[in-house]
Structure formats: C-alpha cells, structure tokens
Image (cartoon, rainbow, N blue to C red):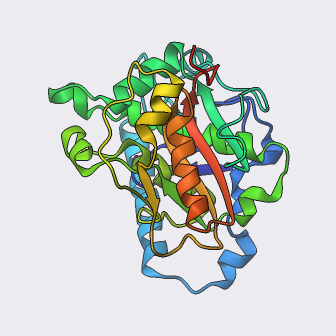
C-alpha cells in the first residue's frame, strides 16, 4: 500500500521489507486510519480534491522528472528517498531491539534507526542544513521522514492496539529562538509525517517549552536530566484524558523525552507513547 506525504512529496510502501525497514507487510500503517469503506461513505471535501490534484501533479512530475536517490543520485527511484544500496547502509532498529524510552512515563516507544553511521549523517544534515543551495536539498528531510515512519511500523509490529487509541500527535517543543535560528522545527516536521501516516491531528500546543535550556550536546545523562528539569509544561487543552504520541528527532540519553512525557502526564494525559527517528544504543551516561 503506497502512502504519500503531502509536505515533502515523500512516497513509500509502508511496512514492506523490500523498501525501508525490517517490518512485515501485514503491519501497514493504513490500518490505523479510516478504512476505505469509511472513506467512501464520507462526502468529498475540498481537502480531498486538493489531495487528488496533488497526486496527479506528483505523478506527472515523476513521469517527466524521474526521482533520484537522495544519497547517490541513482535513477529512476520508485518509492523511497533512497535506493536499495543506500537503504542498506541505514542501521535500522529491529522490533523490540531498542532500549525502552522513558520507562514508567511512556507506555511504549520505538525508534526508526540507531543513531550511528548513515542515520547519524542524514539526521545531522536534516537538523543542521548547510548554507546556500545545499541547505535547500530535500533529501535529508525525506530520509528523516522515512525513519519516523519506520518507528511507527516498529510500534505496530506486535499488533498492539495502542496506536489505534492515539488521539493526537505531539512534537517535542523547541524554543522559538532556536526555531528562528534553524529556520524550521525538526520535531514538528516529523510530527506532521507521523500524523499523516496515522490519520491523526498534530497538537503543537499540547506541550510547550517554558524554559530556554542550554544545548544538550556533550552532556551526560545526569547532566541532561538536570538541564531539562521543568523545561516543559502541558498545554491548557487537548491533554487531560487523551492518548498522545510524542515525537522527537533524536534520543541520546532519553532525558529530554522523559521530561516532556512527565509534563504530559502531569497535565492529565491518559497514555503517552513516543517515537523518534533515531536513538543511541545505550541510553546511559556512557
């Protein structure tokens, strides 16, 4: 089953072991949205026509300008942002292989890949785009989106009903000054990718940053936990009694994710799940 992300133009076969991640076909994310019967019973709306027009335009562009691999430039490319050899360089996380994300605060969590090798390179390019034309290249954003979709597939791989109960997708917030400095919000973009795959809304105001904390780079887990203590607060609406999916780009020690999940739980969230594009193999001080 083919899915297409409306913002980046990314297109892939979700849950196909021949495309991106080691997840079987039976765990397609399509089952977490509305069924085809339910969609057919609904009257068309302007958004449906816009999606149809976008699909037609994208198909025309694919025919006239074949997709190229974001890694090596190989053409033609049918679905993924990367060709098969470049995909094989990604250190994908096998189901159940990754350590727990914020145990006790997060009901279930998953990562798309290990934060090393090709995944580390792509995510650094995504989070810190270069200057000039190099910074406008869509490849890093497309690859990051596919990593977050792989994390969703990992959550779905044991047929657990948790994803079906998700009511909204919450991006890990970042201070406005940092967003202006980068020009975009990395976790916010990935939250929209996850929401599009699940058919759920994004709730950017469900969690907010209340303290401008120094960069976490180079800090140990204990230092990071002190650094992010009290850094987040739940929003006034859309949290109490809700089942939420928290989205981050990279998890190295889990301290930031723990602080954010704790804020949502204090705000009354019934359940918090979490995914990230990549995580470190050991969420410890080492």
Question: How many callouts does the rendering have?
Answer: 0
- Residue nearer the viewer, 125 or 14: 125
In the rendered image, residue 9, in percent from the top left (x then y), is placed at 42, 47
* Left or right: 169 in relation to 94: left
Eyeballing the image, is 36 above or below 98? below
Residue drawn at (41%, 65%) of the image: 205
- Residue nearer the viewer, 8 or 206: 206
In the rendered image, residue 23, in percent from the top left (x then y), is placed at 76, 35
Eyeballing the image, is 71 above or below 46? above
In the rendered image, residue 269, in percent from the top left (x then y), is placed at 62, 65
Residue drawn at (67%, 49%) of the image: 105
- Residue nearer the viewer, 285 or 95: 285
Eyeballing the image, is 183 above or below 207? above
**Residue 79 location, quadrant:** top right
Eyeballing the image, is 93 above or below 169? above
Residue reaching furthest to the bottom: 43
- Residue nearer the viewer, 224 or 242: 224
Residue drawn at (53%, 25%) of the image: 221
Residue drawn at (50%, 30%) of the image: 77
Whether residue 228 can be seen here: yes
* Left or right: 191 in relation to 100: left
Q: Quadrant of the C terminus?
A: top right
């Amino acid at each position: 089953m083919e899915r297409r992300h409306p913002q980046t133009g990314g297109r892939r076969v979700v849950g196909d072991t021949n495309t991106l991640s080691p997840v079987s076909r039976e765990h397609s994310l399509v089952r977490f949205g509305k069924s085809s019967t339910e969609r057919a019973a609904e009257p068309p709306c302007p958004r449906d026509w816009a999606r149809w027009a976008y699909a037609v335009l994208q198909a025309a562009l694919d025919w006239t300008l074949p997709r190229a691999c974001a890694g090596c430039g190989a053409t033609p490319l049918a679905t993924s942002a990367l060709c098969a050899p470049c995909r094989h360089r990604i250190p994908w996380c096998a189901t159940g292989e990754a350590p727990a994300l914020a145990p006790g605060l997060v009901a279930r969590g998953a990562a798309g890949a290990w934060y090393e090798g090709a995944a580390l390179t792509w995510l650094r390019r995504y989070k810190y785009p270069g200057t000039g034309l190099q910074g406008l290249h869509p490849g890093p954003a497309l690859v990051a989106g596919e990593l977050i979709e792989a994390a969703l597939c990992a959550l779905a791989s044991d047929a657990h009903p948790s994803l079906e109960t998700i009511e909204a997708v919450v991006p890990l917030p970042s201070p406005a000054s940092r967003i202006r400095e980068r020009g975009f919000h990395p976790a916010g973009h990935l939250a929209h990718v996850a929401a599009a795959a699940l058919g759920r809304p994004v709730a950017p105001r469900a969690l907010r940053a209340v303290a401008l904390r120094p960069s976490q780079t180079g800090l140990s887990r204990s230092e990071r936990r002190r650094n992010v203590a009290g850094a987040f607060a739940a929003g006034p609406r859309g949290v109490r009694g809700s089942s939420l999916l928290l989205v981050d780009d990279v998890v190295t020690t889990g301290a930031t994710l723990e602080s954010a999940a704790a804020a949502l739980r204090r705000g009354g969230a019934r359940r918090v799940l979490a995914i990230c594009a990549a995580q470190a193999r050991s969420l410890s001080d080492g």
